[in-house]
Image (cartoon, helix red, strand yellow):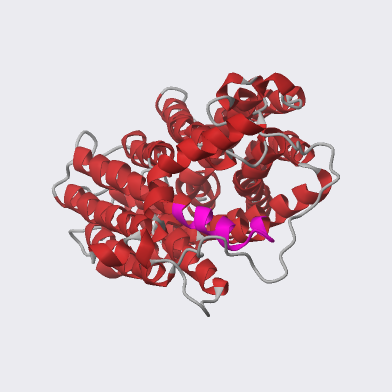
Amino acid sequence: MADFLDRKHSVAGPGYSRWLVPPAALAIHLCIGQVYAFSVFKLPMTKLIGISKPVQGQDWTQSQLALIFSIAIFFLGASAAVFGKWVEREGPRKAMFAAACCFGGGLLVAAMGVAWHNLWIVYLGYGALGGIGLGIGYISPVSTLVKWYPDRPGMATGMAIMGFGGGAMIGSPLAVMLMKYYATTTSTGVMPTMVTMGIVYFLFMLFGVFTVRVPAPGWKPAGYVPPMTTNRLITSANVSADEAPKTPQFWLLWVILCFNVTAGIGILEQASPMIQEMLLAPKATAGIDPANTEAITKATAPLAAVAGGFVGLLSLFNMIGRFVWSSTSDYIGRKNVYFIYLLLGSLLYFLVPMAGHMQSIPFFVCLCLVILSMYGGGFATVPAYLRDLFGTAQVGAIHGRLITAWSVAGILGPMLVNSIRDHQIKVAHATGADIYAPTMYLMCGLLLVAAFCNFLVKPVDASHHMKEVASNAVDSHLKKA
């Protein structure tokens, strides 16, 4: 098995079709993209002991559970940066297998934590171990697709990144269906659901392991001609990975990505509880005596499935946005498309509480769908933005370092949403849309700060450019590393 996973045994032979690589990439990204559907577990995991309702002081709170998602995203970014060179050196097959073991195994460890009601084990399983699987799995197919599609790099990476964004479209309804199947009078069904999904995802990711190949050295598609561009915003020079963080452009993009992800991930992580608490529950319990807990529980019981469908719909637009917005950036420019993400996004966040106060489910859903499409588009566009500013020589390594912004946002976004939510409920005694209104206004402000940073982005000063000799030396060093 070890020999099979080696890079030298995954080099494509004559007749291998490069169109087999995108399905292999999707097999990985559609699985690890399940992290975007984690919110469907949150409410059931707050009732593991109480079953029908949380037992105060014994069941976990939403703020405690939000850390699971945050830890996973932190380890995604950290592992992508740490293992980037290892993935290039060992090849996609070994990396994908490692990702399958970590992500599938993380779900199994998390299931043990649920069974023993030990939150630290859940943090370790889904958060740390699963997060490492996310990071390795995220970068391995993307790097390989770029090598197979030098003629269509945007399309190729868009397919893989689109799969990651669409993972919740499968994971959300699957988790809801399994929890409903496994639920009993003494169990919410979370533990067996995690076990089942861990095994299923591991086996599905093996399809990518056995299918993926790397091109032979020097391979190019038939008739390939290096692309030419007259876009003045795309530099013809290169900046090294070590030099890029010394430029203001790198840190401006870091803030832009961090704040854009903070805003989007805050909604995505809390999507299921948010629509239930802002819109579905108030409508379902209208006219019911607040003291009649049995009637309220019966009225709100079906809402989890509806909210799960909402999470899946968000995933669909997150996925579509990655392809549509990044493709649009090829025509209007990376900087301009980021102005759309940030300025239009700030307006939409401002309108979300209004939709809640109006009790308009269609308006609320439409706002969230556009927001999530731009959230996904931000991920798909940033590698091209980096390429425009820093050239192509070291853009992969620079991207790996920039992804640390995702790690920070993975903690910052859910922490802000959940801590403000808890304050609104416990201190301000807020209900409905007022639970989340302060958070939405805060996200609006963050996006405006990011828009100002985007305005400040200028071409990199020539003093940071690599000389031709230096460029070759750095490339040689990276290959050896």
43 vs 70, nearest the viewer: 70
Question: Magenta includes 234?
Answer: no
300 lies left or right of 182: right
User: Of all residues shown, which one is farthest toward the left?
Assistant: 116
Kindly identify the residue that appears in the image at 65 percent across and 20 percent down: 248
Which residue sits at x=75%, y=61%?
225
**Depth order, front residue of 331/278:** 331
Q: Is residue 190 above or below residue 210?
A: above
**Observer able to see residue 442:** no
Give x and y (percent) for residue 362. 67, 55
Residue found 59% across the figure and 40% down from its top: 395
Residue lying farthest bottom?
A: 15
Which residue occupies the foreground of this view, 37 or 223?
223
| Residue most extreme to the front | 469
In the rendered view, would you say 427 is above or below 417?
above
Task: Examine the image and state in which quarter residue 389 appears.
Answer: top right
Can you say whether 338 is above or below 451 in the image? below
Quadrant containing the N terminus is bottom left
Is 396 on the left-hand or right-hand side of 175? right
User: Which region is colored magenta?
Assistant: 140-153
User: Foreground residue, 413 or 117?
Assistant: 413
Residue 436 is situated, as x and y percent measured from the top left of the image, at 54, 34
> What secondary structure characterizes most of the magenta part?
helix
Q: Quadrant of the C terminus?
A: top left
